[in-house]
Amino acid sequence: MPGTPRLRLGFALLLSAQTATEAIEAFQRGQYAQARQMLEKIVASSPNDDTARTFLALSRAATGACDAAASDLRQQFNGNADAALRRLAGIALVQCDLARDRLENAWPVLDQLQKEFPDDADVLYETAKVHMKAWNDAVFQMYQKTPASFRV
C-alpha cells in the first residue's frame, strides 16, 4: 500500500510527541535534563508558549546552564503575564546570580520579588541567602584589609 509508510511515520511522530505538560511534570519530578530535552523541542515548534519557554529556562538553570538561561529567565521575569511563572523565573534568576557570584544583578530582582510576593517563603529564603552571601563577603574583606580591627 502506497500510504502505509506515510501512515507509519505519522503514527510514530504522534507517539513521540511530547507535550509541555509532560515536560513540566518531568521537571517537577526533578528530571531536569529530560525536561530540558523535551522543552527544547517544544519551544522550537511553539516559540510563543510562555509556559514552555519559562520551564525551558528553569530546566537550563537547574542543569547548570545559567549562562544560557539568564536572558530567558530575565525576559520571563520581566514580561510574563502569569505571576506564578514570573515568580519562578525570578527565583531561578537570583539563584543563578548567586551561583555565579553576581550579587549586583540579584538585588534588583530580589527587590521586585519582595514587592510582588512579600509573604512568599521561597522569596524570603532566597533573600536571606543573598544577604548572607553579602555578609560573608564583607566579613572576608574585613579580615583581609583590616585584620587588626577590633571588629574582626
Image: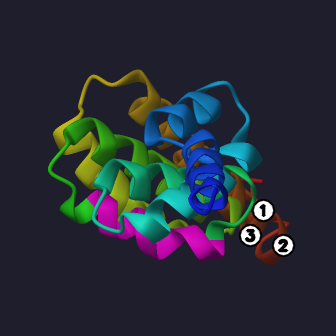
Name the image quarter holding the C terminus: bottom right
Residue named by callout 2: 144
Secondary structure at numbered mark 3: helix
Magenta region: which residues? 67-77
Whether 128 is among the magenta residues is no
Figure disc tally: 3
Q: Is residue 86 left or right of residue 131?
A: left
Question: Do the CB atoms of the residues marked 1 and 2 lie less than 8 Å apart?
Answer: yes
Q: CA distance from mark 2 to mark 3?
A: 5 Å
Decide: marks 3, 1 in contact (CB < 8 A)? yes
Q: Residue at x 71, y 31 (%)?
A: 30
How crowded pointer 3 is (Cα within 10 Å; few <14, some 14-19, many 20+) is rated as few
Q: Circle 3 is placed at which residue position?
A: 141
Q: Is residue 143 above or below residue 27?
A: below
Q: Which residue does the image show at 61% across and 63% down from the upper left?
A: 2
Q: Is residue 28 above or below residue 32?
A: above
Q: Amino acid at mark 2?
A: Gln
Q: Which residue is mark 1?
A: 140
Circles 2, 3 touching at the beta carbon (< 8 Å) = yes
In 3D space, how far apart are the residues under numbered discs 3 and 1 (Cα atoms)? 4 Å
